[in-house]
Image (spheres, rainbow, N blue to C red):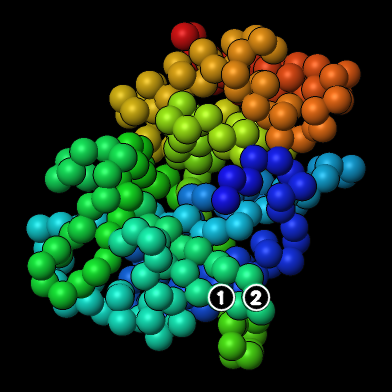
Amino acid sequence: MNRDHHSDYNTELTALCERTLVTLIGDIGPWSDRIYLVGGLAPRYIVGALPEGVSPHVGTTDVDLVIGLAIDHDAPETYETLQTNLKKSGFAPGEHSFQWTRTVNGATVKVEFLCETDQTPPGSIFRPKEGTGSKIGAFNVPGAQLVTRDYTEHALEAERLDAGGRSKITLRVAGVLTYTVLKIFAFQDRHDNKDSYDLVFTLANYPGGPAGAAEASRQSGIFEDAQVTKALRLLAERFASPDHDGPAAYAKFLTSPDGEDAAARLRNQAVAVVRQYLSALGFEA
C-alpha cells in the first residue's frame, strides 16, 4: 500500500510500532546492540521535545532497522538466533526475506531489516548466511552502515505486545546526519512524499532548528565521509528552489490537491529549511 499523504498515518498505528520495537529489542538478546532505528519512527527520538505550536510528526506504519553486519566474524548460529527470537516475538517472514510481519488487533506491523554491503548490488537483498538454515535477509541500502558510527541512545518504555506488561529498552537511533543522508538517498531512489516530509520535519525541528542540526552534523564522526558529501550535494539539488521535486513532495504530503496557497507556502518552507541547514554547514554544491 502506498502511504504518501499525512492522512494515511495515525497515532494508534505509530504507538503499535513503538510497542513492537520495545518487544522486539527486548527479545533479541545480544543483537540489541547491533540494531539501529532509521525509518519513520526515528524523528520523534532525533528531535525530542518539539517547539511550542509545532504539530507532532505523523508517525509511521512500519519499523526500519539497520543490522550492524560483521560478515567475516558472524557464525551461522548468530543469524539463526535472530530468526528464532523474531519468531518468539510473534513475527513471521513477509513477502521478502528482509521483511517480518505480525498482526496485532487487526493491524499488520512490518519490520524491515536494512544493511550496507559490497557482497551484493545496492537495492538487492543480502542474505548473510544463505544456505545455513537462516532465512534472515537485509535490503542493501547505500549509506546504511554510517549509522554504526553516528547514532544516539534513547531509553524507551512502552507496553509489550501480547499483554506482556511495560518494559524499558535502550534504543540506538540514527544521528541527524545519517538520517539526512539516508532520507535524501531514499527520496532520490523512490520519490516518496513521506521521505521529503521526514527529512524537512527533522531538520526544521531539531533542537536549535536547521542551524542546530548543522552543528550536530558537523560534530559527527562521519562528516568527512564521501557518502555524506554526495548526499549533501544531492540535497542541495533536490531542494534548490520551490519548483524542484523535494519541496513539491513535502507540500503534497501535507496538503490537499486543491490547497494551492498552502502548497506554495510549504514549498517555500522546505527550501528555507534546507538552505539554512546547508548554509550553517558551510556547504557549497
Say whether residue 263 is left or right of residue 165.
right
Q: Secondary structure at mark 1?
A: strand
Say whether residue 144 is left or right of residue 3.
left
Q: Is residue 169 above or below residue 277?
A: below
Which residue is found at the position 82% from the left and 32% from the top?
256
Which mark is on residue 106?
Answer: 2
Q: What residue type is disc 1 on? A: Thr
Identify the residue under disc 1: 103
Q: Where does the image place residue 127, in percent across and percent down from the top left?
A: 20, 58
Residue nearest the observer in this picture, 216 or 3? 3
Q: Where does the image place residue 108, in percent across and percent down from the top left?
A: 57, 68
Q: Where does the image place residue 135, in percent across and percent down from the top left?
A: 24, 69
Q: Residue 123's image quarter?
A: top left
Say whether residue 179 is left or right of residue 270.
left
Which residue is found at the position 74% from the left and 66% from the top?
12
Residue nearest the observer in this picture, 67 or 4? 4
Which mark is on residue 112?
Answer: none
